[in-house]
Amino acid sequence: MDLCGNFTHTIDSKGRVSVPAGFRDQLLDDHRLVLAPFTVIGERCVDVYPYGEWQKLLEKFDARPKFNAKSLKFQMAYIGRSHRTEIDAAGRILLPPALREHAGLRRDVVVMGQSHMFRLMDEETYRKVMGELDAEAADDQGLFEDLNL
């Protein structure tokens, strides 16, 4: 799966947002998704997993020690607050109120491809985060060296 790029979309009055056509095309015949609350670079957002990718994440999690403090926190904060959804005939997903509130998603959101999943972030928050990241990268030319890509 190659979910990349970012797109601005508007949440409608019923709490639905469009999934970019290029993302929908890659989901083939399985339009099931899982939404999970996340915090990235100090800002809240919603992670969106194709169902198969979510299953892979759960398999990795299930292989970890069950009573480890970090595992319990991850289970409570991420898995326990996740929601299943499906892409409707118009190419939209319903964002549950709890996740919209978590990420401060009110109207305009940015849908960002993240390789095997995508992320939803309030547009204003996205611009702030990307501005900070761009400034940091300009100050530190080796910012991503440790990734060994």
Image: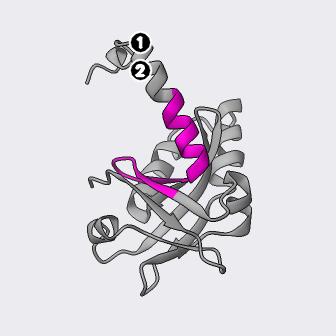
Figure label count: 2
Left or right, residue 107 beside residue 114: right
Residue 2 drawn in magenta = no
Residue under the point 47% across and 22% down: 135
**Quarter of the N terminus within the rendering:** bottom left
Residue 46: tell me if it is visible.
no
Residue under the point 41% across and 12% down: 140
Which residue is more in the foreground, 104 or 34?
Answer: 104
Mark 2: give few (<14), some (14-19) or many (20+) Cα within 10 Å.
few
Residue under the point 54% across and 45% down: 126
- The image shows residue 50 at horizontal and vertical percentages of 41, 62
- The image shows residue 26 at horizontal and vertical percentages of 27, 66
Residue type marked 2: Ala
Which residue is more in the foreground, 148 or 103?
Answer: 103
* 94 versus 112 height, above or below: below
* 18 versus 72 height, above or below: below
- The image shows residue 14 at horizontal and vertical percentages of 65, 80
Q: Which residue is mark 2?
A: 137
Q: Alpha-carbon distance for marks 1 and 2?
A: 5 Å
Mark 1 near mark 2, Cβ–Cβ under 8 Å?
yes
Residue under the point 47% across and 67% down: 33
Mark 1: give few (<14), some (14-19) or many (20+) Cα within 10 Å.
few
The secondary structure type at the circle numbered 1 is loop
Magenta residues, start to end: 110-132
Residue 129 drawn in magenta = yes
- Badge number at residue 140: 1
Which residue is more in the foreground, 45 or 73?
Answer: 45
**Quarter of the C terminus within the rendering:** top left
* 20 versus 72 height, above or below: below
Left or right, residue 124 beside residue 119: right
Residue type marked 1: Asp
